[in-house]
Image (cartoon, coloured by chain):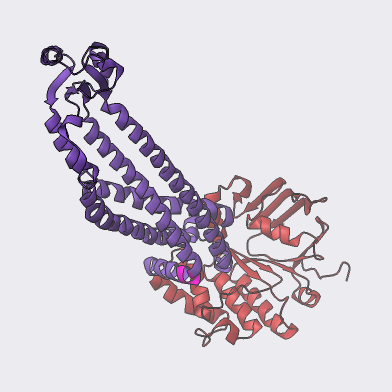
Amino acid sequence: MIRFDHVSKLHKGASRSALEDVCVDIERGEFVFLVGASGSGKSTFLRLLLREERPTAGTVWVAGKDLNKLTNWKVPALRRQIGCVFQDFRLLPNRTVAGNVAFALEVIGTPRDEIKEVVPNVLELVGLTGKEDSYPNEISGGEQQRVAIARAFVNRPSILIADEPTGNLDPETSIGIMKLLDRINKIGTTVVMATHDVAIVDQMRKRVIEIDTGHVVRDQSRGVYGMGA
Amino acid sequence: MRFSYLVKEVSTGLRRNLTLSLAVIITVAVSLSLFGSALLINAQVNKMKDYWFDRVEVSIFLCGSISDSPNCIDGAISEEEKGQIRSDLQGMTDIVDTVFYESKEQALLRFKEQFKNSPIADTASAEQMPESFRVKLIDPTKFAVIEGAFGLRPGIEQVVDQRQTLQKLFDALGGLQKLAQAIAGVMILVTILLISNTMRVAAYNRRRETGIMRLVGASNFTIQLPFLLEAAVAAAIGSAVAVGALVASKIFLIDQTLAKTFTFTTFIGWEAIYSVIPIMLGAGVGLAVLAAGTTLRKYLKV
């Protein structure tokens, strides 16, 4: 599903590479934690996946496509296959819960009838039935992240990228979010989650890829956060 | 849905940036008014050229009893010389179109008509007026031939090409035309810069929405369209104001003031206005969309 083939990325003006000679293979339906300190290269990894950046060397493959060869106007089609969730939720404050989810479909030209049908379904999946007409500032952080996940997943992407999705949430709420991501993964979605949250990684026992100063230093199935723990 | 979404986006965009939208509308209105005026001044000058160059004559002034030019030391022209000049002129059929003799009395009438508002008209007498032949040439540029043939003849005070006098006038008008064009050009440049800056602000204001749109895979076209339409709507309103201003100046300035005061020349008609309107609208909206598109390409990258 995702393949990094000797990928290096040197940002303009930076003295050292954000990623160096990274080789990673992620199968369809896998759940992968991406761990490492701030500045280790996790974000660059995710940005390369979304083709927000291009590698300086090597090839990134996503869903069978060589991103180096992808023309600009085909990038939107790639991103429709990838859902994205962030630490800061990134909801639109002037739209309701349902409105935020619907927005993702409206802007890719989904017919209104389909939106009406799909949005309640996905809100049910993330456990927000009854909150459709609330605004983001009226609901809790955990609920806001559920809205964000619903928005990322409403288009049924084959890959879900989560960049520190529990970074702003308390441990209990985080567990709820992880259960939700796990459920989405079980439906068959490939999930790549960058995180600092030791407890969550240790508890989930999923594949762990650790990046340190741009190098993959560990790739372990059913891993934990710290090396050798 | 797509349409209602667009209408909503564009109207909230324009309202959110009300001051900047107004600035764009006013700048577009002013610069297009100047642009349209420059085009109309062009049309007016061309019209005047057609009108006047069609009427220019070569004047052959004849010596009278009071002429003090060195060409007239022999005194007033004789009837014989006059007849000779007339028949010579009429013989030059390849370059002379018509010949008209203007007597002192006719010259006085014309003088009085031209200066009817001035006290000088009351004191003028026929004796002070020169007799002349008014010659209309088939090709108005062939003045030198006439001057060569008659310039040094006894009894002729002076051969004058009205075209040269007119040319000076049109040279001056040409300078004004260029000035108007330059001002219009500068204003259009200002408009482009303002629109480009407005789009930058608009893109910044909506970076949250556009960021999400990018992530969920909206096409560039979908992301940029509301911005482009916003620029186009503002420019269209500005262009409409400019067109209104031009129509108003045609009615109030040209038809009701200038045309009544300066009866000796013609002014541009409505057909000139009609031909300028689509150019203005097209230029206004086209420029806005082009300026906006170029800016957005930079600020709303994939």
Tell me, yes or no, whether the highlighted magenta stretch contains residue A176. no
Q: In this view, does A120 lie above or below B79?
A: below
**Residue B114, visible in the rendered structure:** no
Quarter location, residue A192: bottom right
| Picture coordinates of residue B74, whole percent (x, y) | 23, 13
Q: Which of A75 and B172 is in front in this view?
A: B172
Q: Chain A appears in which tint?
A: red
**Residue at point 52%, 75% (across, down):** A100
| Picture coordinates of residue B252, whole percent (x, y) | 26, 58
**Residue at point 25%, 19% (across, down):** B157
Q: Which of A172 and B167 is in front in this view?
A: B167
Range shown magenta: B14-18
What number of labels is visible? Answer: 0
Q: Is the magenta stretch mostly helix, strand or loop?
A: helix
Q: In this view, does A189 lie above or below A11?
A: below
| Picture coordinates of residue B195, whole percent (x, y) | 50, 57
| Picture coordinates of residue B225, whole percent (x, y) | 45, 59
Pick the quarter of the image with the C terminus of chain B.
Answer: bottom right
**Residue at point 42%, 40% (across, down):** B178
Q: Which of B131 and B284 is in front in this view?
A: B131
Pick the quarter of the image with the N terminus of chain B.
Answer: bottom left
**Residue at point 52%, 50% (across, down):** B294
Colour purple belongs to chain: B
Q: Is residue B59 above or below residue A181?
A: above
**Residue located farthest toward the right when viewing the structure as drawn:** A228
**Residue A159, visible in the rendered structure:** yes
Q: In this view, does A64 lie above or below A82?
A: above
Q: Using residue A56 as the reference point, say whether residue B27 is left or right of it.
A: left
Q: Using residue A223 as the reference point, say whether residue B70 is left or right of it.
A: left
Q: Which of B291 and B170 is in front in this view?
A: B170
